[in-house]
Amino acid sequence: MAAAYNELLDATIQHLENLKSRGVRHVAVTSEVLKALQSPIEKPRANAPVSNPRAPISAPLEKTVAPKIISTAIPSATSEPSAIGNRQSAITAPSVIRHSSSEKAAAIAALRERALACVKCPNLAASRKNVVFGVGNVDAQVMFVGEAPGADEDEKGEPFVGAAGQLLTKIIQATGLSRADVYIANILKCRPDTPGETSGNRKPTAAEMATCIPYLHEQIDLIQPRVIVALGATAVEGLLGKTVGITKLRGNWQEYRGTPLMPTYHPAYLLRNQAMSEKRRVWEDMLAVMGKLEMPISEKQQNYFLKA
Ligand code: URA
């Protein structure tokens, strides 16, 4: 009995360590299990010595499917790179531990400090002017996620401040929100370097994305937006691990660990393709987001970018 108990415990610890090495920092547990984890070790049965000092679980196993699910942290996820998007499939339960705004702000500030000092991609650390961590309201209901900083963002240390960013700001404002209401971040916190080139951008490599993505996972975990908007194919790939074309995915609700995620075109695409039909598509995605957030939608808003 004690051997089986310890085997189960070791398997559980191994499983958690595997999740952690893949970038997962939260697992769903019931309040009963959490309470049991915090209580003193119970012997598996009378007179049997507890041979494994790490053995704190005393809750009956069937209780682990109790309806009240909360999430608890597996510490220090950003110490190791994770595979892109794989935590999505590992965990489906929503996090419902709520932090106060000041706790969130402090945690985000601490995370920002870590990101600002990051040198995990030596080439990017050497070429960047600024780490572009993210900006906005820590209590935002909606979070916009882009690909990576461009030259303007690198210069200012703020995401989406160049031409594409100005268009994103207009899109946000068209919903009735402002940049200060939402949170904006990127898959990569550093501008992808372009050695030997004086201008231009490049897509982040898979390795860069896998190295950087834990910062974004933590931002999302802390902010707990009600909706995520993934801007373009790279954002979808980074968050969901999906490489299906954005044309197919956009407009169709996806899920990031229980949070509804709307894929839409990157604003840079709208700058390249000024067709009314493409603007309308992005706007319809925003209308869906507004609907999900139960925001008021005027008739005027309903009809933006429809031909007269
Ligand atoms: N494009 C992005 O994906 N992110 C930015 O911050 C700017 C442009």
Image (tube, rainbow, N blue to C red):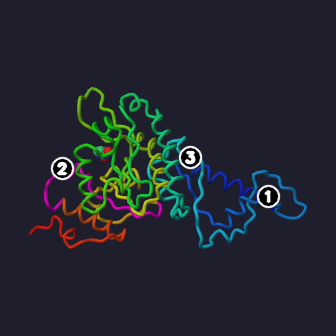
Q: Residue at x 68, y 67 (%)?
A: 32
In the rendered view, tell whether residue 64 sits above or below residue 164: below
Q: In the rendering, at what x and y percent does residue 297 appear? A: 27, 71
Mark 2: secondary structure: helix
| Left or right: where 55 falls relative to 69 | right
The N terminus, quarter of image: bottom right
Mark 1: secondary structure: loop
The answer to whether marks 3 and 1 mark residues whose Cβ atoms lie closer than 8 Å is no
C-alpha distance separating marks 3 and 1: 27 Å
The amino acid pointed to by label 3 is: Ser
Q: Is residue 197 magenta?
A: no
| Left or right: where 74 falls relative to 215 | right
Q: Which residue is mark 1?
A: 41
C-alpha distance separating marks 2 and 1: 61 Å
In depth, the one of 183 and 236 nearer the eye is 183
Ligand 1, seen in the image, is in the quarter at: top left
- Label 2: how many Cα within 10 Å (few below 14, some 14–19, many 20+): few
Labels 3, 1: front one: 1
The disc at residue 21 is: 3
Q: Which residue is mark 2?
A: 271
Sequence-wise, the earlier of marks 3 and 2 is: 3
In the rendered view, tell whether residue 126 sits above or below residue 93: above
Sequence-wise, the earlier of marks 2 and 1 is: 1
Q: Is residue 270 magenta?
A: yes
Magenta segment: 257-278
Q: In the rendering, at what x and y percent does residue 298 appear? A: 23, 72
C-alpha distance separating marks 3 and 2: 39 Å
